[in-house]
Amino acid sequence: DEEDAALVRRQVSNYTLNTGPFGTMHAIKDRETFSALEWWNMHGGGTPLLQSLALRVLSQVVNTSSAERCWSSYSFIHSVKRNRLSLDRAESLVYVHYNLRLLS
């Protein structure tokens, strides 16, 4: 919704500029001592849209396995013997190699 998006942008602006509910002495001081999740639960209530967005982002599971697989494919293709490959060619080969592995 465009209205909600505009409201979230204003709330992000307040957060980055330390104004509104984010400009209180406690909100600024607690950024250093609370975890991000605790801080948003404690001080984000005045901005429910931004708070819910922040909590969803902070609740994402961090997993590097897909990046590791990509780097593994890249190291297989761009080795010492093949170090003259151009960047575009190497990226194309990694793309094909990775997708072929997914299909098989």
Image (tube, rainbow, N blue to C red):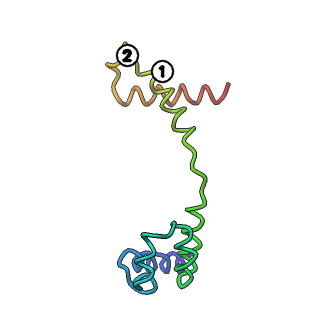
Residue that sits furthest to the right in the current view: 104
Q: Vertical placement of 33 versus 95: above or below?
A: below
Specify few, some or many for label 1: CA neighbours under 10 Å numbering under 14, 14-19, or 20 or more: few
Q: Label 1 amino acid?
A: Phe
Q: Quadrant of residue 57?
A: bottom right
Q: Nearer the viewer, residue 62 or 95?
A: 62
Q: CA distance from mark 1 to mark 2?
A: 10 Å
Q: Label 2 amino acid?
A: Arg
Q: Which is nearer the N-term, disc 1 or disc 2?
A: 1
Q: Vertical placement of 84 versus 74: above or below?
A: above
Q: Nearer the viewer, residue 67 or 84?
A: 67
Q: Position of residue 93 (x, y in %)?
A: 47, 25
Q: Element at badge 1?
A: helix
Label 2 sits on residue: 82
Q: Quadrant of residue 30?
A: bottom left
Label 1 sits on residue: 76
Left or right of 22 in this view: 69: right
- Residue at horizontal 41%, vertical 26%? 90
Q: Which mark is residue 45?
A: none
Name the quadrant of the C terminus. top right
- Residue at horizontal 57%, vertical 45%? 63
Q: Vertical placement of 5 versus 84: above or below?
A: below
